[in-house]
Amino acid sequence: MPAITVDDILVLPRVPEPDVTQTERKVTSVTTAPSAYEGEGFPVRRAFAGVDLDRLDPFIHMDQMGEVDYGPGEPKGTPWHPHRGFETVTYIIDGTFRHQDSNGGGGLITNGDTQWMTAGSGLLHIEAPPEELVVSGGLFHGFQLWVNLPARMKMTTPRYQDIRAGQVALLSSADGGALLRVIAGSFGGPSLDQHCGPGVTHTPIALVHATVSAGAQVRLPWQADFNALAYVLAGSGSVGTEKRPVQMGQLAVFGAGDGITFAAGPRQDMDILLLGGQPIREPVAAYGPFVMNTRAELVQAFEDYQAGRLGSIPAVPADPHPGHDVL
C-alpha cells in the first residue's frame, strides 16, 4: 500500500496505551461487507451493511472501493450526481481519482490523499479516473465515507478540502507496532493535541488509517463520548481483548468505554480503518444521494435538484492540482 509511510516508525510521537482506570470497549458485532457495483460499474464493498444506523451515528454509509487491478480501458467512475445534507470523505490508497463539483471544488487525489466535500445545501458532483489511467489501467483502492450533518448544518454552504498525503498526522502506537495516519480528529491526551489530523469537521469525528505489523497488538485510548468502529482494509487479525477474529472486508463495532484493542495476525500486516464520532441522535431520512431529517426535506431536495437549484455541470474542469480549499 503506497499511502504515506515512514522509514523508521520509532522516530514518530507515540500514543500512550490506556491506563488502568480506563474501560476497555468490548466488541458488540463483526459483520462482513457484501460486494456490489457503484457508478458506472466499479466494484465496492458496502462496509456498513447489516448494522443499525444507531450504532453507526454520525456515519451513514461507507464503501471500500476495490482493491482492483484494472486492465487497459477498464477503469470506471460515476456520472454527475447530486448530494445534500452530509459530507463525503474519499481516501485513495492506490491509484488516482479525479473529482469535480458544481461549487468549484475538485482535483486529482492519489496515493494517500483525501478529498473532503461538505455537500451541505447541495451541489452536483462527479468522480472518475483520469484519461491516462483509463488508457493504461492499473491498481485502484480506497474508500468513501459519508458523515452526517446535524439539522442546523444541513443547509450550510458547500465546502471542499483537499488533503494531501503529506499533511496527515503520523503517529506510532506505544511500542512501535503500528503506524497511525490521522486524517481527522485527535486522541492520546493533551500531550498529542498538536498532532490532530488536518480534516476540518462540522461533526466531531476521528478517522485513522492504521498499519499494524504482523503479530503486533495495539491498545489505543478512545474518546468516551464517541462511538468506535474498525474496518479491515487488508490482511487479518483480531479485535477486542476477547480477540474476535477479523479479516479484510469486515467491520467491528465496539461498545462503550475509553480504549480499543486490535491486533494483526502472525503472518502478515493488517491495514485497518478506525472511525469514531460524536452521535448526532437526530432522525435520519436518507434516500439515494440525500441525507436529511424528514421525508418532506427529502422531497424538497429532489424538487430542488430537478429544478436546477443544486447547481449546473461546469463547462471548465476544476484545477487538477488545487492549492487551497475552495469554499
Image (cartoon, rainbow, N blue to C red):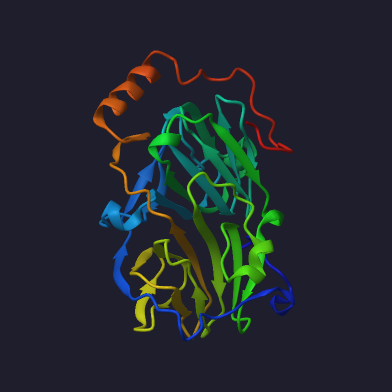
Looking at this view, is 161 or 315 the one in front?
Answer: 161
Q: In the image, what residue occupies the spot 34% across and 76% down? A: 26
Q: Position of residue 71 (x, y in %)?
A: 53, 48
Q: In the image, what residue occupies the spot 49% across and 26% down? A: 123
Is residue 4 something that shows in the picture? no
Looking at this view, is 106 or 184 the one in front?
Answer: 184
Q: Residue furthest top?
A: 307
| Location of residue 152 (image quadrant) | top left
Q: In the figure, 301 relative to 129: above or below?
A: above
Q: In the figure, 27 relative to 316: above or below?
A: below
Figure label count: 0
Q: Position of residue 67 (x, y in %)?
A: 48, 57
Horizontally, is 6 left or right of 70 in the view?
A: right
Is residue 149 something that shows in the picture? yes
Looking at this view, is 121 or 141 the one in front?
Answer: 121
Q: In the figure, 199 relative to 215: above or below?
A: above
Horizontally, is 32 left or right of 156 in the view?
A: left
Q: In the image, what residue occupies the spot 30% across and 28% down? A: 298
Q: Quadrant of the N terminus?
A: bottom right
Q: Position of residue 226 (x, y in %)?
A: 42, 61
Horizontally, is 47 left or right of 70 in the view?
A: left
Looking at this view, is 201 or 165 the one in front?
Answer: 201
Q: Position of residue 44 (x, y in %)?
A: 40, 50
Horizontally, is 188 left or right of 284 in the view?
A: right
Q: Quadrant of the C terminus?
A: top right
